[in-house]
Amino acid sequence: MNAIEPFIRDINDFPKPGIVFKDLTPLLNNPEATKVCLHQLLTLVGDQPIDKVVGMEARGFFFGLLIAQALDAGFIPVRKPGKLPHETISETYALEYGSDILEMHKDAIKPGDRVLIHDDVLATGGTAEAVCKLVERLGGVIVQCNFIMQLGFLNGKERLEPHTVSSVLTY
Ligand code: AMP
């Protein structure tokens, strides 16, 4: 068993019936487990040079900034509409019911920047796909889409092709 697995808590029927929510808070509450998780995420990146780490609101912020610091890269928050104060670009993506929008600052990425995209969980891949589009619209080169967990049965990895998808845990 991976050393961080005991710190991921399954919450049944959250936020709605039928969903098994992967709760990261026991991991965040344990400094040793947090260090191990960061180390494993960095191992996924290896020695590939990274200019920018993009993290998705909100659970992509926790490790996104830690990864960026460790790689000596900048951190870029991707946020829900209306939260970023400067000029933004946005992508609309489909949800099970309806759609949602994600935004990024227009000046966050320069053409040719080597970008690592990070979030806690890859499920259907809709969120990460929208973030890939934002990065590529600004001319960023996606080096890896990096997650703590991927829910393999939802096939998010295929949706993100041809980008490289890596995760510490796969369920
Ligand atoms: P998706 O766009 O379907 O890949 O969903 C990914 C986003 O939803 C991520 O930002 C996750 O934080 C969140 N998410 C989706 N499914 C779960 C789950 N079972 N447990 C925790 N977070 C989830």
Image (cartoon, rainbow, N blue to C red):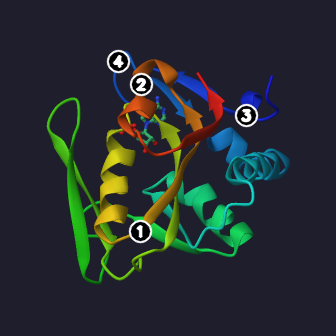
Q: Residue 37 versus residue 18: which sits nearer the camera? A: 37
Give whichever of discs 4 and 3 has the lower sequence position: 3
Q: Residue 112: image x %, image y %?
A: 45, 74
| Mark 1 CB near ligand 1 (8 Å cut) | no
Which label was assigned to residue 17?
A: 4
Label 2, on which residue? Answer: 155
**Image point (57%, 73%), residue name:** 51
Contact? badges 4 and 2 (CB < 8 Å): no
Q: Earlier in the sequence, mark 2 or mark 1?
A: 1
Q: Residue at x 41, y 80 (%)?
A: 110
Residue type, mark 2 in image: Asn
SS at circle 4: loop
Q: Secondary structure at mark 3?
A: helix
User: Mark 2 or mark 4, which is nearer the start of the sequence?
Assistant: 4
Q: Which residue is mark 1?
A: 140
Residue 27 figure quarter:
top right
Residue 57 in picture, x, y percent from top left = 42, 57
Which structural element holds mark 2?
loop
